[in-house]
Image (tube, helix red, strand yellow):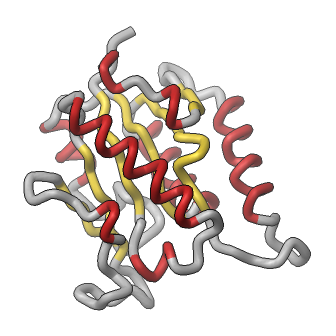
Amino acid sequence: MAYASALLVIDMQNDTVSIAYRAAETVAVIAGLRERAKAAGVPVVTIQDQGAGTEAGTEGWQIVPELSPAVDETVVHKISPDSFLDTDLDKVLEALGVTEVVVTGFATEICVDTTARQALSHRYDLVLVADGHTTSVRPDSGEYAAPGQSIAHHNEIFRHIDFPGRNIRVLPASEVDFTAA
């Protein structure tokens, strides 16, 4: 089946990456995906949070240099975990003819999960990049799942979600094939 894909890069900003689990590895994975997407003519859409505690224009709000969007790339600003809510993301994707979103970014349990589920509700097929999303560093004990466990948990949940009429895949970055789009 052919897809018209877009790569979504969610909240990979200086402040979030500074507290991210496996930050360097995740940034490198996403940077590699960006290069491959661009080489294949697949649009890259950067999502940039400017909600509470993330003031637009500050150093912490900036996208990390390795993932800084090119002048011709779309940047969508959001103020909630849902990259579709009160943004023009859906219109941007529709205008590009996108049928499938390839989701990466921060934070696994919040913005990545919410945006991935909303993409399905907006009738997009979904690829969750198993090694292309991350969450905050935190203790292995406490109310939250350990970071690695949380990432694995969400990958497994998306492998088993049944969403009628949607194709959902969880793939490592090495298996994401933009040339098939």
* Percent x, y of residue 54: 39, 86
Q: From what the image shows, is residue 105 above or below residue 95?
A: below
Closer-to-camera residue (50/45): 45
Q: Residue furthest left?
A: 72
- The answer to whether residue 18 is left or right of residue 46 is right
Closer-to-camera residue (163/67): 67
- The answer to whether residue 95 is left or right of residue 33 is left
Q: Quadrant of residue 139?
A: bottom right
| Quadrant of the rendering where the N terminus is positioned | top left
Q: Quadrant of residue 9?
A: bottom left
- The answer to whether residue 150 is left or right of residue 8 is right
**Residue visible at 80% across and 55% down in the picture:** 149
Q: Residue furthest top?
A: 1
Q: From what the image shows, is residue 150 above or below residue 180?
A: below
Q: From what the image shows, is residue 108 above or below residue 96?
A: below
* Percent x, y of residue 32: 39, 44
Q: Residue furthest right?
A: 141
Q: Quadrant of residue 65?
A: bottom left
For the image, the number of numbered tags is 0
**Residue visible at 47% across and 66% down in the picture:** 81
* Percent x, y of residue 53: 44, 90
**Residue visible at 26% across and 46% down in the picture:** 44
* Percent x, y of residue 128: 53, 39
Closer-to-camera residue (174/163): 174
Q: From what the image shows, is residue 91 above or below residue 11?
A: above
| Quadrant of the rendering where the C terminus is positioned | top left
**Residue visible at 67% across and 42% down in the picture:** 155
